[in-house]
Amino acid sequence: MKGLAEGTLALDEPVIEHFDRCLGCMACVTACPSGVRYDLLIESTRADVERKAKRSPLERAFRDLVFAIFPYPRRLLRLAPLMNLAARLGLQRFVRGGALLPLIDVPAASSPLPERTPASGEVRARVGMVAGCVQRVMFPQVNAATVRVLSAEGCEVVVPPQAGCCGALSLHTGRAEEAKRLARALIAQFEDQQLDAIVVNVAGCGSAMKQYAELFAGDRQWEARAELFSAKVRDITEFLVELGPRAPRAPLNQTVAYHDACHLAHAQRVRQQPRDLLCSIPGLKLVEIPDGDQCCGSAGVYNLFEPASAREIGERKVTNVLSTGAPVIASANPGCSLQIGALLRERGVELTILHPVEILDRALSGHRY
């Protein structure tokens, strides 16, 4: 990155390939003893690569197709049945070197989230919730559980119906202007709502939203607005631990292995809060995954653009998951859940993969596994 910035290194094919193969998992942020903001440096360099790189027409078209679909829930919803058909027919063998095609369990008639959900009992906070794009389509049950838990813990929940993609996929892949366009639209939806916090249940989204001030640095119209927005962003586990428990938890006598999503553990430094939240449930036994802070290979859309590397990394993660013997996996990012689930199914193994807030929701409702 320094070589490119100083002009001592050309942006040639080997350099482009090097950056394309970077997971963007942000483990370098955690590892660096000097606290270098590699997250910002990587995003800036990737944006430069995307502006200047000479990609083949086929590769450029494929990238454009991905970003014409995934940030837009309605388009993704229409495509989901075709993706499921391709996965069931085993067509991943013919897709970009074996890219994983996950099975997407989309309810036939998923109800939209209410724009406002009242708090149960005395109001402790008024929060906004980001429904997202991939999460909204592929894991609507996580959003529904998030609203129920927040309400049970005394929060009035506001979900602006027009709020869409946060721009995380675009930002983390170097499509900076696209990310800014999506971010501006999202910020505008939550302004003037008088919120104590803006809650998000997707690790990658939370990471991007907390960086909006840096994304709009120097922009007179949007920098201050982005800073105000980012200051209120909390991961759902982070927010609930800060708020403290109020609703009674029923026992869940189950062993759960917690998977650290990279953009939660490394980028946001939210590690202990999900564990504390799970350990607040009576009867639940939490176990650690060996090398748990290593990436699962999903990394946003990395598994679509670099499928061979993503599969190798994912296989290592799945082996470590299975070594725990836990029947339930807690994962706070939809990409991780899809990646791990698809590789488990390839091995003929069916484990339950849930967001931590889904597990808490079951404890609050007295649901048994």
Image (cartoon, helix red, strand yellow):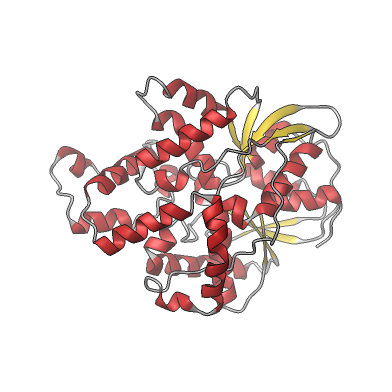
On the image, the x and y values in percent for residue 241 come to 70, 37
Q: Residue at x 66, y 37 (%)?
A: 159
Q: Residue at x 63, y 39 (%)?
A: 161
The answer to which of 32 and 224 lies nearer the viewer is: 224
The answer to which of 234 and 188 lies nearer the viewer is: 188
Q: Is residue 129 above or below residue 90?
A: above
Q: Is residue 55 above or below residue 203?
A: below
Q: Residue at x 66, y 35 (%)?
A: 239
Of the 4 image quadrants, the one containing the N terminus is top left
State left or right for residue 290 relative to residue 3.
right
On the image, the x and y values in percent for residue 342 come to 56, 69
On the image, the x and y values in percent for residue 107 come to 69, 61
The answer to which of 325 and 252 lies nearer the viewer is: 252
Q: Could you say which quadrant of the image residue 245 lies in? A: top right
On the image, the x and y values in percent for residue 271 come to 58, 44
Count of number-bearing discs: 0
Q: Is residue 268 visible?
A: no
Q: Residue at x 44, y 28 (%)?
A: 213
Q: Could you say which quadrant of the image residue 129 lies in? A: top right
| Residue furthest out toward the left | 8
Of the 4 image quadrants, the one containing the C terminus is bottom right
Q: Is residue 192 visible?
A: yes
The answer to which of 150 and 309 lies nearer the viewer is: 150
Q: Is residue 306 above or below residue 247?
A: below
Q: Is residue 345 above or below residue 53?
A: below
